[in-house]
Image (tube, helix red, strand yellow):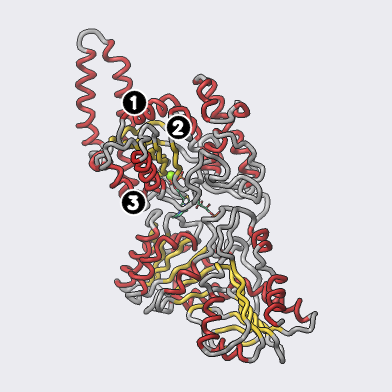
Amino acid sequence: MLDTVHGPRDLDRFNRAQLDRLAGEIREFLIENVTRTGGHLGPNLGVVELTIALHRVFDSPRDTIVFDTGHQSYVHKLLTGRHDFAMLRQEGGLSGYPNRRESEHDVVENSHASTALSYADGIAKAYQVRGQSDRRVVGVIGDGALTGGMAWEALNNLACAKDRPVVIVVNDNERSYSPTIGGLADHLATLRMTQGYEKFLSWGKRTLPKAPVFGGAIYETLHGMKKGIKDIVAPQGMFEDLGLKYIGPIDGHDLDEIESALRRAKGFGGPVIVHCITRKGEGYRLARENDQDQFHQVGVINPETGLPYQAQGTTWTDVFADEMVKIGNDRPDVVGITAAMLHSVGLHKFGKAYPDRIYDVGIAEQHAVTSAAGLAFGGLHPVVAVYATFLNRAFDQVLMDCALHRAGVTFVLDRAGVTGDDGASHNGMWDMSILQVVPGLRIAAPRDPGQVRTQLREAVEVSDAPTVLRFSKGAAGPEIEAVDRLGVMDLLRAPENPDVLIVTAGPMAAQGLAAAEILAAEGVEASVVDPRWVKPLDPALVELARGHRAVVTVEDNSRVGGVGAAVTQALQDAGLALPVRVLGIPQQFLNHAKRPVILERIGLTAEGVAAASRAALS
Ligand SMILES: Cc1ncc(C[n+]2csc(CCOP(=O)(O)OP(=O)(O)O)c2C)c(N)n1
Ligand SMILES: CC(=O)[C@@H](O)[C@H](O)COP(=O)(O)O
Ligand SMILES: [Mg+2]
C-alpha cells in the first residue's frame, strides 16, 4: 500500500482497515531503513497515525503543515512521495529534516526546536493579508519543543488572533530525549489524566442519549460537569486560559480519533490546540524499552538487537563526561546545566554522581545561559553543555547576562565544527565567529583528549569571565604532543629555519602537522602552533610569526570572523605585513553529507593546508 502513495490525496481512497495496514507498512519501512542508515527512528515511529491523519484532513500544500524541529518528518516524506531512504542524511540522499528543494510540501528546514508556531503565525498572517484565509495552517510541535520560550511567544500571538485558523498539534510523548521536564510537562500530564474522562464522555455520548427517558439528560449533565471535573482533575488548561480552544487529550495512535479531532479543529475557524498523546518508538519493542531516549536518534544498528554493528570508541563527549565527574569531586561549587540533552552532551555521569548539582532546563538554551549567570552570582560555577549550533540562539544572554557581568560560567560546546549528517542547521560552524565579539569571554579549542581535560580545568578556574570549550562530534582524535610551550600556546613543530607558520585551532592540529610533512618533502619548512586559547590570542603569537615568511591558519569554524580573522588582525595591529591564508568553513550553508566528505570538499585537509602554504609563500 505504501508503494501506491505518491501524494497525500492518495490516502483518501483508503478505508480504516487499509489505513491500519498502511501504518504497519510504514513502521516496517522505518525500522528496516533507518536502522540501516541511522536517524531519528523513535520520533517517527511515534507519529505514523498522526501524520496520516494530518494529510487526510488537511490538503497540503494548499494547506500548510509545519513540523517543529523536523526530525519527525520521515512519515510526512513517505506520504508526500519520497520513498528512497537508502541515502538518508547522506550526500545526494534525503535530508533528515524537511527540505524545500525536495518537496513543495516542506516548509521549515532547520532542526532548531521551538520555531514552528512562530512560522505558523507568520504564514497565517500572510494568507490573511493575501486574502487566502481558506488555507489552513497547522503547526506540529512536540512536548519537548514546547518547553522552548519561542513557542510561548508564538502561542501568545496565536491566542489573540481569533480570526486566524491556526491549528496547533501538540505531539505529546512525554519526552524530549529523556522525560520532558518542568511545569509544562506536569500540566500536560494532568491533561493526559483526563484522557480517561474523555473516553468516558465519548462512551456517554454514544450510549446515553439512546438510553430511555433520562439518558439524554444524564449525558447533558455529565457533559456539563466535564468542565467542572476537568478543573478538579486537571487544573483549567492553561491553553484555554490563554484563549486557545483546547481539544484533547486524544489517543495519537487511534486514526479515527485523531481525524475526528483534526476535522473539528479545522472547522473551528480560530486558533485551536489538538493535544495528541503518542508513544515514541511505537511499534518497535526495542525502542519502547530503551529508557535513555527510546531510540530518539540511532546510528547504524542491528534491527534485531538494537545494538550498533561497530562500537564507536571513545568520543570527545566521553572525555568531557569523565573529566566532569572528577572536577565535580574536586570542586563542590561546579554544577551542570543541560538543555534536554543530558546524555548527548555528556553530563549524565556528572548528574548520576551529583544529582543535586545537575539541571535539565528543557529545550531552553536562552534560559540555561541566564540561569547560569544567576548560579554564578549565587557563588557557584556552572558548566553549560550544549551543542555549538544551539548556543547561537542564546548569544545575547552570553553577551549581556554573562560577559557584561563577568560571570564565571563555562560553556562546553559539543558538536563544534562540521557535523555533517544533520545538515546545514546542525554544523557547529559559527561559535568561534560570533563569540569573538564578546568582551572578556575566552575560548579554548582543545586539540586532543588530553587538552580537553587540561583546558576544561583551566576554564573552570576562571571565575571573572565566561569561558568556552569547544570540540567536535564523534570519535576523539589522537593525543598530539607539544615540542615546546610558548606562553599559553603549544608548539607542535619547530624547525630551525621555518618558512611558514601554520596556526591550528583544535583538532585541526592533525591536518596542520600532516601538511608540514607534505611541505617538508618539498623542502619547505613549516612551524605548527596550537594557540590552545584562541580568544584572546597570546601576544607571543605575533612574535613567533616574525620569524616566518608567511602564515596559514586552519579552523573547523566559519572562516569569516573566526580565529584566522583574529590572527590576521593581530598581525596587522603589530604592523607585521606577512602573507596570510585563512582556512575555514566557507560562508555557506553546508548540505547534509558525512563529515569527511565535507572537510575534503572545503579543503580542511592536510593537502588543503599545504596548498595554502605554497600559495602564501609564492
Ligand atoms: C534549540 C534546540 N535545542 C536542542 C535540540 C536537540 N533536540 C532535537 S529533538 C529534541 C527533543 C525534541 O523533543 P520533542 O519536541 O518532544 O519531540 P519528540 O522527539 O519527542 O517527537 C532535542 C532536544 C534542537 N533540535 N534544537
Ligand atoms: C534533531 C536534533 O537536533 C538532535 O536529535 C540531533 O539530530 C542529534 O545529533 P547527534 O546525533 O549529533 O547527537
Ligand atoms: Mg516529545
Q: Label 2 near label 1: C-beta < 8 Å? A: no
**Residue at numbered disc 2:** 54
**SS assignment at label 2:** helix
Work out whether 551 lies above or below 595: below
> Mark 1 or mark 2, which is nearer to you?
2
> Mark 3 or mark 2, which is nearer to you?
2
x, y percent for residue 356: 36, 62
**Residue at numbered disc 1:** 199
- Separation of marks 1 and 2 at Cα, in angstroms: 22 Å
Tell me the residue at 52%/69% (across/down): 470
- Separation of marks 3 and 1 at Cα, in angstroms: 27 Å
**Residue at numbered disc 3:** 182
x, y percent for residue 94: 61, 45
Q: Amino acid at mark 2?
A: Leu
Depth check: give the residue in front, 337 or 98.
98
Q: Amino acid at mark 3?
A: Gly
